[in-house]
Image: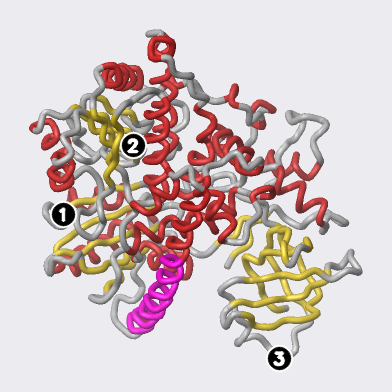
Amino acid sequence: MQIIRRPDAGTDHLPENLHPLLKRLYASRAVAAPGELDYSLKALLPHTALSNIDHAAVLLADALAAGKRILIVADFDADGATACALAVRGLTALGAKDVRYIVPNRFDYGYGLSPEIVAVAAEQNPDVIVTVDNGIASVAGVAAAKQHGMQVVVTDHHLPGHELPAADAIVNPNLRDDPFPSKCLAGVGVMFYVLIALRAVLRERDWFNAQSISEPNLAQWLDLVALGTVADMVPLDHNNRILVAQGLARIRSQACCPGINALLKLSGRQPAGITASDLGFAVAPRLNAAGRLTDMTVGIECLLTDSAEAATAMARQLDQLNHERREIQATMHEDADQILRDLALAEGADAMGVCLYRDDWHQGLVGLVAGRVKDELHRPVIAFAPAGDGINLKGSARSIPGVHIRDALDAVATQNPGLIAKFGGHAMAAGLSLDAACLEPFAEAFDMEVRRQLNGDDPVGRIISDGPLPAGSLSMQVAKLIAEAGPWGQGFPEPVFDGEFELLERKIVGGRHLRLQLKAPDSQKPVNAIAFSTVDHDWPEQVQRVSVAYRLDINHFAGRRELQLMVDWVKPL
């Protein structure tokens, strides 16, 4: 593991009244102007910058005026669930008389607007289908919907393929030549912008007066936007930081939907002090568990209900599913470790692009396994499981900086026609399907393409550090300062510091986590630290000092608050 410190950057362009530490942190994250720290809604990019959004808004406004039935087709992850709940809540508040939704079960229908899910949707006789967090690759599905006489509005953020679906409107910031400055919107963010555009059209038509309904404040659903944006791990550029900051503010003030509130409380988080990482590590996994193990409907319903009692009951269901997910995932991780041990004894164990498969793996959890192994090996990983039809495999890929995973799959598919049945995704994560008989040749082709993209580089694990924490800064006050200076997240990382500490105490907790008590050179007061998924079995018996890369955290326990270090890496000295 390498510790790489961020280079110093000039701070003269940042406000003078900013804390010196925050100036340094912001400058090193390429904050180029004070305006990039403005998280008010007035700083949000205008919806008019998105291509096709006006056309989509007019189509939906016409559908509202005609009393058409609108069916939302969602994805089965947290981004898709929040986008679906936002679409149903928003369209209904804007005056739609008949809004329904359907979310494909990943085990029966797979991802997106497929012809099979269109056949299921047709049973509800929708006039308009609106996809959220999917659809950009649904060429056949959109064609099937059009054959049924349905209009189709695609709202998505995934990268487009060579052929676009023949939808009536497509809103996606990643369309070729789309001028929208932020390409990082999550699916829920795209849907939020569509609602903004639709409201603008309805205003022009004097719709709200004509219908005797109040014009809704769309910002009331920014809690959903924040959750989906953080959960999908899209980069937090300035525009996304606005959306997340505004959503967090509503959650902290208890102005959020009962479902998010119930999930927070069930995970032991207090809404008043919620951060983006709480959404990512406490709420999102519980919501995602439904889509991974069974059906995302209970997750969407949890976000749609206005009853605190119903939300609590559904949150408990989601929490139980998450416990089951953890147990299955732990077994799969053990399996993956054994596969890696076996590979180490076999020829070709030095693969740069790693493919893992077991015939008893759960297809809803292979992405988590791929992510874990990717972190261990520091190279792209695809984990496969049976698709359930006895013929095909479903794979989930996770990548590293330097390897664009969707482009890698595209290159493999182009050079080897018929090898991959279908694929889609982002730079760092993707999904694919292939015939089980194609696994070995695919693994070879994938490894070759990863090697080509790495161009001879040998990937190693890196922790990007903000350097040593200034003397006297290891305190609750600084931890609170940093927490409030966010939102931090993907592409705008939470500050990580590194330094040497005196080791006062260490012990394993929960069987696989290392709890430490440390003392900084400039402090007389010890501080507690926790290194998750880390053990000290290979440490020398007597260790007095350690080198640590860490984040500042405030631990809430038994009504008390105390400083805690969240350890990303630790090495005995």
Q: Position of residue 542 (x, y in %)?
A: 75, 89
Apparent side of residue 43 relative to residue 300 in the rendered image (left or right) = right
Type of secondary structure dominating the magenta stretch: helix
350 or 142: nearer the eye? 142
Q: Circle 1: is it few (<14), some (14-19), or many (20+) Cα within 10 Å?
A: some
Q: First in sequence: mark 3 or mark 1?
A: 1
293 or 563: nearer the eye? 293
Apparent side of residue 249 relative to residue 83 in the rendered image (left or right) = right
Q: Circle 2: is it few (<14), some (14-19), or many (20+) Cα within 10 Å?
A: many
Instruction: Determine whether 514 is above or below 180 in the image.
Output: below
Q: Position of residue 181 (x, y in %)?
A: 46, 27
Q: Which mark is residue 541?
A: 3
* Region rendered in magenta: 320-343
Q: Which mark is residue 156?
A: 2
Apparent side of residue 9 relative to residue 191 in the rendered image (left or right) = right
Q: Position of residue 259 (x, y in %)?
A: 50, 49
Q: Is residue 398 part of the magenta span, yes or no?
A: no
Q: Circle 3: is it few (<14), some (14-19), or many (20+) Cα within 10 Å?
A: few
Count the marks: how many?
A: 3
Q: CA distance from mark 1 to mark 2?
A: 21 Å
Circle 2 sits in a helix, a strand or a loop, which is it?
Answer: loop
- Please name which of the two marks, 3 or 2, marks the residue nearer to the observer: 2
Q: First in sequence: mark 1 or mark 2?
A: 2
Instruction: Determine whether 91 is above or below 397 in the image.
Output: above
Q: Looking at the picture, which amino acid does disc 2 mark?
A: Asp
Residue on which the image places disc 1:
421
Q: Position of residue 161 (x, y in %)?
A: 24, 39
Q: From this viewpoint, which residue is outermost toward the right? A: 524
Q: Looking at the picture, which amino acid does disc 3 mark?
A: Glu
Q: CA distance from mark 3 to mark 2?
A: 54 Å
Q: Is residue 322 part of the magenta span, yes or no?
A: yes
